[in-house]
Image: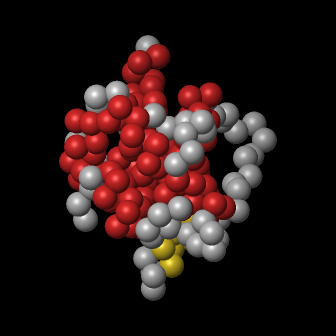
Amino acid sequence: MSNLVDEVREWNTPIIGAFLLWHFTTGYKQNHPYGESPVVILHFIATGILTSNDFLKAISGHRPNLESFVRNFTDSHESDLLSCLHQRILQRRAYTTAAIDIAVSSGLLVWDCEQAILHPADAPRIKRGGLKLGNDIKRVADKAEILGKWFSKHDIPSITAYLGVVL
């Protein structure tokens, strides 16, 4: 099979989404001023961003915050990408729901149904001889943690206002 077909099959599976959401949630919790975990709605926004190469390019450890991420699109005259984020989130709802289900059932994330929060579980142990993650997935996982860090510094109304997302 060609590399392109492998890549499409790999990225379109909610299993990768579950892994990325675990990294996002971990980055959020580790960097939140009070160590809180994110509410579920933020996972839907994160998936919309993390499954797009256009958005992923702008996530970098060199950027200090979410405002810098958004400013990148306005400065580079690509603000139309931000205006499409809301629609992208809606289109990826089923994918995000499946990724959350997989993350919870596999023990990566833990539901707090009372507060609609997902908590990250401890780092998963990789079985000896198991499949190794590709470098591309590791890079996106690092970006997921950075996005979680950025989100942890803001409340939901601020995040949605910066990104132009309507809840």
Q: Quadrant of the C terminus?
A: bottom left
In which quarter of the view is residue 159 placed? bottom left
Residue 13 can be seen, yes or no: no
- Give 42 or 3, whichever is nearer the viewer: 42
Picture coordinates of residue 65, whole percent (x, y) = 52, 48
Residue 64 can be seen, yes or no: yes
Q: Residue furthest bottom?
A: 114
Q: Is residue 65 left or right of residue 41?
A: right
- Give 165 or 142, whichever is nearer the viewer: 165
Q: Is residue 90 left or right of residue 128?
A: left
Please count the marks in the image.
0
Q: Is residue 142 left or right of residue 96?
A: right
Q: Residue furthest top?
A: 2
Q: Quadrant of the N terminus?
A: top left
Query: Going 70% across and 62% down the picture, which residue do you hit?
Result: 122
In which quarter of the view is residue 130 placed? top right
Picture coordinates of residue 126, whole percent (x, y) = 73, 47
Query: Going 44% across and 14% down the picture, which residue do you hit?
Result: 2
Picture coordinates of residue 74, whole percent (x, y) = 32, 36
Q: How is the image coloured?
A: secondary structure
Q: Residue furthest right?
A: 128
